[in-house]
Image: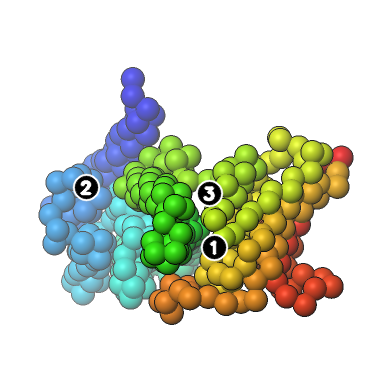
Amino acid sequence: MTSDSPRSCARAFVVTLLVMSGIPDLLNASEGGYAIWPYAVVLGIGYAALLWPARRRPHWLTPQLRTGAPAVASLLFTAASLLLGQEALFGPGETAVLLSLLFIAVRHCPQPWTVVCGILTGIALLGTPARFYQDDTSGLLGFMMAALVLIGVVGGLAAFMRSQDYRRTVAVVETRRAERVAIAADLHDFVAHHVTGILVQTQMARMMATTQPEHLDTVLAGIERAATEALASMRRTVGVLRDTGPDAADRRPVGDLAGIAELADGFASPVQHVTLDRDPTVPEDLPHEVQAAAFRVVQEALTNVRRHAADATEITVRLRHDGRRLEVGVTDDGLGGTQLPAAAHGGGFGLVGLTERVTALGGALRAGPPAGQTQGWEVRALFPTGKV
């Protein structure tokens, strides 16, 4: 038995109950000496609109046509009965069909057809008692009040489910938007970091080709390593874009505290020295999201050093843990000089996105000159870790 079997059984039960509800309409009309064909026509149109399989439904059979045609047929039957002065019955089958069509109209019809089809179906349902109680005002009012209650219940339920559908759609759109923003952030954090490094080291190689050729191989190796890492990061990110399965998010390129050491080593160059100052008290088992955010802080800060402080010679990456908070800091001694082209400076969104990441974890981020110093720049983030 498949997982859809309970749903299929429930659908079959509802269809059977709906069809069986029309039998009393036809039997009562036959036993009362009324013509059967008007009831058969109204019920037939209603059942066709309700029970036509969705996979075989033609494109022209829209929700507004499905709900409007049976309602018009019922209204014509009622109008003919009143104009000719001939009494006619109404029964549970037609009532069930019209209520079902009202539900479809309110939940599935596009605007403004929702209001039009809903009102049309409601009027058709309210008019059915008038066929039989043409001269009995009290009986007519009683059945119309009962019909109003049913219309309110079914219409309210359909409206609630429509609002839930809308909220679900909005949630899906927002989730997809958040996913795209996250992937864009990954592209910025990883690929831009490596590409900026390639650009800087390429400029350095051009200068060293004539002045320090003995160190050129080290710079070229760094360019090769940065290009390889950029390509790997891009492949992982594109893999996330192509794969929508449940494991796609797990392959997003993320970092941790151990990756910060590799990041610092990969950033170092013959003219820039990077020191990793990690306190031994920093735990290895910090929450993964905290480690990933700390990695992003260091990565963004180092990328900004390349972009905005190419003259820096000493960069310090600092990790501290005081028992409850993780402190991540990146300090450089640059004066803000850079020789990068204007197009490589970035749009200024790196620290904005970084602030969002840090504050989302309950932390705080500060970027500015180091306290008590006249030159250099510092990026400092504090993360609550919950560890004692």
The amino acid at mark 1 is: Thr
Q: What distance separates the C-alpha of mark 1 from that of mark 2?
A: 55 Å
Where does label 3 land, which residue? Answer: 266
Q: Residue at x 62, y 44 (%)?
A: 261
Task: Give the secondary structure at mark 1.
Answer: helix
Point out residue 228 in the picture as x, y percentages from the top left corner.
38, 46
**Sequence-wise first label, 1 or 2:** 2
Disc ID at residue 95:
none
Q: Residue at x 33, y 24 (%)?
A: 2
Q: Is residue 200 left or right of residue 334?
A: left
Residue nearer the viewer, 182 or 381: 381
* Image depth: mark 1 or mark 2 in front: 1
Q: What distance separates the C-alpha of mark 3 from that of mark 1?
A: 12 Å
Disc ID at residue 303:
1
Point out residue 385 in the picture as x, y percentages from the top left corner.
77, 46
Crowding around mark 2 (Cα neighbors within 10 Å: few <14, some 14 to 19, many 20+) is few
